[in-house]
Amino acid sequence: MSAVSQSSELISVVALLGAAVVAVPLFRRLGLGSVLGYLAGGLAIGPFGLKWFTDPQSILHTAELGVVLFLFLIGLEMRPSHLWSLRRQIFGLGTLQIALCTAALTGVGLAFGLHGAVAFVGAAGFVLTSTAIVMQLLGERGDIALPRGQKIVSVLLFEDLLIVPLLALIAFLSPLPAEGGEHSRWASIGVGIASLAGLIAAGIWLLNPLFRLLARAKAREVMTAAALLVVLGAALVMQLGGLSMAMGAFLAGVLLSESTFRHQIEADIEPFRGILLGLFFLSVGMSLDLAVVANNWKLVFAMVIAMMITKALCIYAIARLTRSSHGEALDRAVLMAQGGEFAFVLYAAAATAGLIDATVSANMTAIVVLSMALTPLVVIGARRVMPKTSASMEGVEEVHDQSGSVLIIGFGRFGQVMSQSLLARDIDVTIIDNDIDMIQSAGEFGFKIFFGDGTRLDVLHASGAATARAIAICTDNRAVTSQIVELVQSEFPQAKVLARSFDREHSLSLVKAGVDYQIRETFESAVLFGQAALVELGVDEDEAARSADEVRRLDGERFDLEVAAGDIRAGRPLIIGNTPPATPTPFTVPRRESQVLNPSSPINLEEAPAETRGA
């Protein structure tokens, strides 16, 4: 290879990386998202921008590996049991959405003067949503694992499966004679099914033994190479069988999802996935043929708008039909209104089969690319006008007519641990919280949590506060806790009031408010942590326990001084610091030599008043 060609290839790599490094942070800073940044960067350096690249299709073929790796990582999170639980959403919701959208989009094509088969091909390509764009947007929002995200993922998986019968249908509709005749078409279908069966068999019986063997070699680079081999090998097998590479990678991920090596494989693949997926978006941006758009701009822009609106309306209708909320249905419609990367494959196959000509293929490709580029902008615009999506209240019951002996308000980490002592003694407990996701999660572990806001008097009455012997306030917000304490003290004097304190200053305010018991949320765990540290350093366990008791005693004395003086600084002489005191003070207490008193040192962050804390 000559030095000139080597230099040229290196310039191309630098140009791609430079476009990503400049465009993506800029667009994210503007609130436009990374996907649009990649697309804009690709357009800028492509054949219709600065012309640094003249053949974006060659880059696109390589960059499709980013989508392949992305679906492999999704597959790793989809255990077979979880995937089976989504079967109704994948095949039920997916079939409804695809059927309605394809029919409606075919009608749009006919309305713009396309002939029957051409209109159907255009609709079939546009109905295949961009897995890469939607999954990237869902990932940035953190919605992939949520129920609404899982429904979208299910439809995307069904669409990836759909590319197989669509390609077969293109072959059957082709006016050109097939090589080998009808027998050849059926043979292709048989090869596809055999490839799928072979991949599943290899995944079940070969993959885990392979990784166990390689793990014994204790060579990290070999494990990384094996992970890439599995992903690309599965994609190749499916491609040779005439199926989707992305679907092959997804199946490989599912087959490895219950493997003990899953997390290691995921960590090895992630860097490659990120880089190649970014390259994919760059190449899509380069593929936007501005000459085609300019020559047919009225048709292209009209069809982009018409097809995106039509597809969004169909998706919204199906979502509402399947009992999704208005906000969730609208969100899904906006996210999935664009065409996708598989449309390029379908249009190329249709052009090769003689179903559409080169001009129609170029126009449809430009329409899909524009819809992909517009999606991040549409999502941002829709987010500003859409109503806030309220969490589903499924399985959540609002509190009413309760009469437990103890009322627990707030069921976060603190409340969950605190409740165990009461429940172990079969004490009648009523628990309320206003976090719907937490309530639903707690239900899976055998807890009955009622939905209710503890700062409202009517909710407290409905929770049985008027007859409760004790009210435990376990909320994690200082202001909310103080507000509930004030309300309980004035309205329910018969109940003992126990409160979780944020810090020392908050404890003092709670004592002044008259609570029967308060404890700082981190104090006791920090004392035990220090005791454990002494043991690990070789101190006798009994001695370490005595040191912990001494810390508790000094803290109690210090707190009593602060309560009596009404000043959080009154107990400063009892703090064990790590610098020698400037001068002795009349409040100095005896210390062992290792304990140095520093009345002038700053108070630690946990104990400091609000004006001295750093955060």
Image: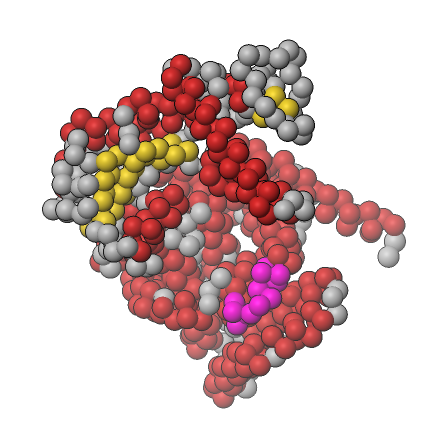
Which quadrant holds residue 460?
top left
Of the pair 268 and 431, the residue shown nearer to us: 431
Farthest right residue in view? 2
Spot occupied by residue 369 in the image (x, y as percentages of width and height): 49, 50
Q: From this view, report whether residue 588 is shown above or below residue 354.
A: above
Would residue 115 appear left or right of 66 to someone viewing this image?
Answer: left
Farthest bottom residue in view? 183
Spot occupied by residue 352 in the image (x, y as percentages of width and height): 53, 68
Farthest left residue in view? 401
Examine the rendering and report whether any part of residue 34 can be seen. Answer: no
Of the pair 133 and 504, the residue shown nearer to us: 504
594 inside magenta stretch? no
Total numbered badges shown on the rendered structure: 0
Q: From this view, report whether residue 179 is shown above or below residue 231.
A: below
Examine the rendering and report whether any part of residue 129 can be seen. Answer: yes
Residue at 43 percent across and 73 percent down: it is 165
Would residue 112 appear left or right of 221 to someone viewing this image?
Answer: left
Q: Quadrant of the N terminus?
A: bottom right
| Range of residues picked out in magenta | 255-266
Would residue 218 appear left or right of 265 to someone viewing this image?
Answer: right
Q: From this view, report whether residue 94 is shown above or below residue 394.
A: below
Of the pair 547 and 318, the residue shown nearer to us: 547
Spot occupied by residue 454 in the image (x, y as percentages of width and height): 24, 36
Residue at 64 percent across and 66 percent down: it is 227
Residue at 25 percent across and 31 percent down: it is 484
